[in-house]
Structure formats: structure tokens, C-alpha cells
Image (cartoon, rainbow, N blue to C red):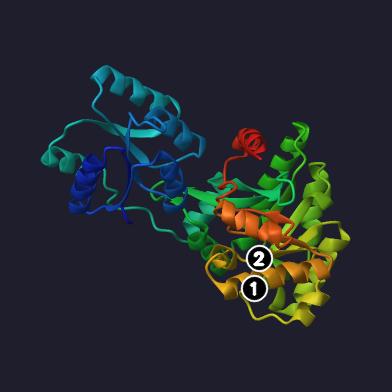
Amino acid sequence: MTNRLLIVDDEKEFGAFVAKVALSAGFKVKLTSRPQEFEAVAAEWNPTLVALDLQMPEMDGIELLRHLAANHSSARILIMSGVDGRVLDAAKRVGVERGLDIAGTITKPVRAKDLKAMLDGLKIQAPDRLDENALAQAIANGDLFLQYQPKVSLRDGALHGAEALVRWRHAAQGLVPPDQFIPLAEASGLIDDLSRTVFTQAIIQQRKWAEQGIDLQVAINLSPLNLHRESLADDIADLCHEHTVPTERTTIEITETAAMDNALQALDTLTRLRLKGFKLSIDDFGTGFSSLTRLQRLPVTEIKVDQSFVRECLVSRDAFAIVKTVIDLARNMGLTSVAEGIETNEHYQVVAELGCDLGQGYGIAKPMMADSLGLWWKGWRGAT
């Protein structure tokens, strides 16, 4: 297990000192002096330990604790500051009350020897293995949960929907990235159980949003192996009917490769999903070797431009040409186009000017817990 320490401190010299000591203690380290950057790194890197300063000009440590709690962080947390001990103790209580694992406090300045001893005591020595049994238990115990990444209209910035993204909160290893446990689920035969969990949580959340007056198109990813189950369309439709969610408000996302492998079975399953009212999206379009003839035969309603092309379209003529071609292809086929990987205002403007319908990416919003979406939407609406 890699011990990963994320440090956020606007005093760059002190942050560098903590990083140097942590490296000597065997940690992998990332250091930032900007709280906004901290949020993105924490979401992507899944640190096992976080050291944060209480006093920063852009965003104080209490706000960062609030952010970590809202995102169900399982990292251990060290609170650092030069303020008096009573304030440090109060900050520690705030973290504990919010359900965070507060490992301790560091009063500045601190000696390298004392800091290293503290860090040595916080290292994870013998984590549980990621295997079939651990994943099966996680599914049964409800350790899998969803975050949602908003999709917005590139014409007027309106909130259109959200993509449901599965996460695993592991007791020893923290947040396990999907690229580690999805292949395990596929190899072990657990993918149908995992997908059923994802669909159930997403559809229940969609109903809750509807009850709050939030009408969203929710996108849910399927594994290629799910397409082999003949009852798939019936099972998902039954879930929607059970929770009174219209099937047409749910988009099923499949990768380009999944749609082209075992094309007959894919066509069978996808056609039945469309007959039941579900929208169908081809994810990561442009990264495979599909023929346009096969694409034309599939009953899809949406094409997603792969994020690798969107991210490079500002600096690469080839990437720009691919993005433009896919958007034009979608328009000419009467399909909705979605640009993934929008990270800056420049990305947003380029794909919008090319006529792309929808967009998602960190420049719009990172994946978030369901109860954070309403607050994000208020801020986004005020900024557009």
C-alpha cells in the first residue's frame, strides 16, 4: 500500500519542510499552497494522509475540513497551525464531529525529529488485499457509493444532467479508484452485482432529486460484460418502474469498444434498452477502431467526444480536427454530442463554438456527492 501525503499550506517554506520529512519517512508527497488546487488533487489522488494549515488567505482549514467531510474522505488528517492550542483543539473537534479521522495536530514550528516520529506512526503498514472476497463484501456491506458529475448545455449553461460515477471506500486503503476494482469485478464475475448496485443507487437518487424539483438526465455506465445478460433491459426497466423514474430520463453509457465487441449481442441488448425508452450514449468516441457502418446500425442517441481530444484541442491541430469531426458527425446523424474533459474556459468556448450540445469536466464541476449538487448549481447559475 502506498502511503500518500497531501500537504496544503500557504507558507511554502514550511510546506516544503513537511514534504522533505515525509519523503524521508517513506511517503509519496504532493504539496500545494492553493486550497482550490488541493480540492482537485484530493479528489484525483486519494491521499491516505492530509496535512492542512488552519490559516490561509483564500480558504481556511475549517472550510477544507468541511469539504473533506462532504466528500466522505477516509484519509487521516493532521491539522497544522501556529495559533494557540485552544484553537487547534477546537478545529480538531470540528473535524471529529464531521466524521473525519483526525490523526492529530502540529503546532508550528516543529522539529524534524518529532514530525518524522509522528508520520512514522501514521503509516499504513499492512492493508487488506483487493481481491474478489473484499469486493464481494464491499458490495454486500454498501461500501460502494456514487458521485455525480454535472453535464451542462453549452448553448446557455443550463444544467442538463449528471453522470453517476462509482467509488469504493475501503477500510484500509481509502478511496479505491474505479480502474482498480472494475477490472476485478469483471474478472471475478461480480460485475453484474456491482452494476445492479450502481443502477439502484442512481435511480433512487434520481427519484429523490425529482421530489426536490430537480429534473435531471442521469447517465450510468455499463461494462461490456453486462451486455451479455439477456435480462439486462428488463431488470433496469423494472428498477425504474419500482422507483417511479421514467426510463427516458436515464442514459446508458457504453464504451465504443463495448459496442463493437460481439456486435450482434450488443445490438440485441441496446435495441431492447431503446425500446424501453432509455437513451444510449457511446463513451470515449474516437479512441477505438469502429467503423461508421457499425455506428450507424446501433440505436444510440448520444456521442461523447473523448476527453483526451478535448484537452488537446487548444494545442493540437489534429485533436481539434477530431473534436470538430465528431461533433459534426453527431449533428449530421441527429445525435446529441457531449464534450468530456472541459478543464478551462477556453475548452468550453471552443467546443461551444463548434456546436457541441453538452459538456462536462473539471472546468465545469468535478464529481460530487448528490447532496452537493444543488449548492453547486446555485453557484454555477450565478456565474453564467
Q: Position of residue 97 (x, y in %)?
A: 43, 24
Left or right of 340, for residue 356: right
Do callouts 2 and 1 mark residues in contact (Cβ within 8 Å)?
yes
**Residue shown at 64% from the left, 55% from the top:** 349
Marking on residue 39 = none
Quadrant of the image containing the N terminus:
bottom left
The front one of 129 and 44 is: 44
What's the amino acid at mark 1? Ile
What is the x, y in percent for residue 242?
Answer: 81, 44
Nearer the viewer's eye, disc 2 or disc 1? 1
Residue picked out by circle 2:
305
**Along the horizontal axis of the image, is 1 left or right of 305?**
left
Q: In which quarter of the image is the C terminus?
A: top right
- Toward which corner of the image does residue 81 lie, by quadrant? top left
Report helix, strand or loop for mark 1. Answer: helix
Q: Position of residue 75 (x, y in %)?
A: 38, 42
Q: Which amino acid does label 2 sit on?
A: Val
- The residue drawn where x is 67% and y is 72% is 256
For the point 12% across and 37% down, the residue is: 111
